[in-house]
Image (cartoon, coloured by chain):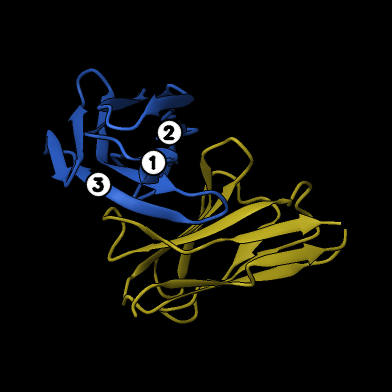
Chain colours: A blue, B yellow
Amino acid sequence: KQEVTQIPAALSVPEGENLVLNCSFTDSAIYNLQWFRQDPGKGLTSLLLIQSSQREQTSGRLNASLDKSSGRSTLYIAASQPGDSATYLCGNAGGTSYGKLTFGQGTILTVHP
Amino acid sequence: DGGITQSPKYLFRKEGQNVTLSCEQNLNHDAMYWYRQDPGQGLRLIYYSQIVNDFQKGDIAEGYSVSREKKESFPLTVTSAQKNPTAFYLCASSTIAGTEQFFGPGTRLTVL
């Protein structure tokens, strides 16, 4: 059974810092991995999707990488801003799961001015 | 605007009652999903549907039921058999199973 872990559980940084969020998974036979942002009391906003055949994806200040052999994905946020404060979740679609996502518990990010 | 709508935003249920949460999408997506989120935890899959008139149980389907009679609609019924239904419920869709998933705004269900 696929298990997904996100480290750290919470992170507080000053504005302008570059930071890395980690997502590890137990089964390397994945179909894709998706990173999301969730604001308090809201739904999830898709940030980046990495297909199994890809190693990284970039969107603006965000870069996500995937290393299936080590069971890890990282989300890199450059030049963080207070507006980046949110919970970040990674969801892993296993190799035979037909799109079912297994989620980590999330990283709560606070960027202070 | 294209997107996923969920209603109501807040729902209160008395013990022993069944309630139905609505999920509608106008993205022309074939696949739809229901997840449950508890405080401080990630999401867990309740049910999913890859196509109209077909759906499968997820990891925590006990006490829930769904239907998929129309492509754009995937309602979730929380039955009285669900022992701990208080949670945040999220609906998602994707073009086909296995592609990027998009989420609705959620329904917060509280059992009184």
Which chain letter goes with mark 2? A
Q: Which of marks 3 and 2 is in front?
A: 2
Q: Residues within 10 Å of mark 1 (few under 14, many from 20)?
A: some
Judged left or right of residue A16, residue B52 is right
Asked if A28 appears above or below B56 in the picture, the reply is above
* Whether residue A28 is visible: no
Indicate the quadrant where residue A73 lies: top left
Residue A24 point in image, percent of width and height: 34, 24
Which residue is painted at 31% across and 58% down in the image? Answer: B97
Q: How many marks?
A: 3
Judged left or right of residue B36, residue A30 is left
Asked if A2 appears above or below A96 in the picture, the reply is above
Residue A98 point in image, percent of width and height: 33, 51
User: Which residue type does callout 1 highlight?
Assistant: Pro
Task: Look at the numbered disc 2 and give the secondary structure of its residue.
Answer: strand
Verify CB contact (< 8 Å) between mark 1 and mark 3. Answer: no
Residue A44 point in image, percent of width and height: 43, 53
Residue tagged 1: A82
Q: Earlier in the sequence, mark 3 or mark 2?
A: 3
Q: Distance between the residues labelled 1 and 3?
A: 20 Å
User: Which residue type does callout 2 highlight?
Assistant: His
Q: Distance between the residues labelled 1 and 2?
A: 6 Å
**Numbered circle sitting on residue A112:** 2
Verify CB contact (< 8 Å) between mark 1 and mark 2. Answer: yes
Verify CB contact (< 8 Å) between mark 3 and mark 2. Answer: no
Residue tagged 3: A48
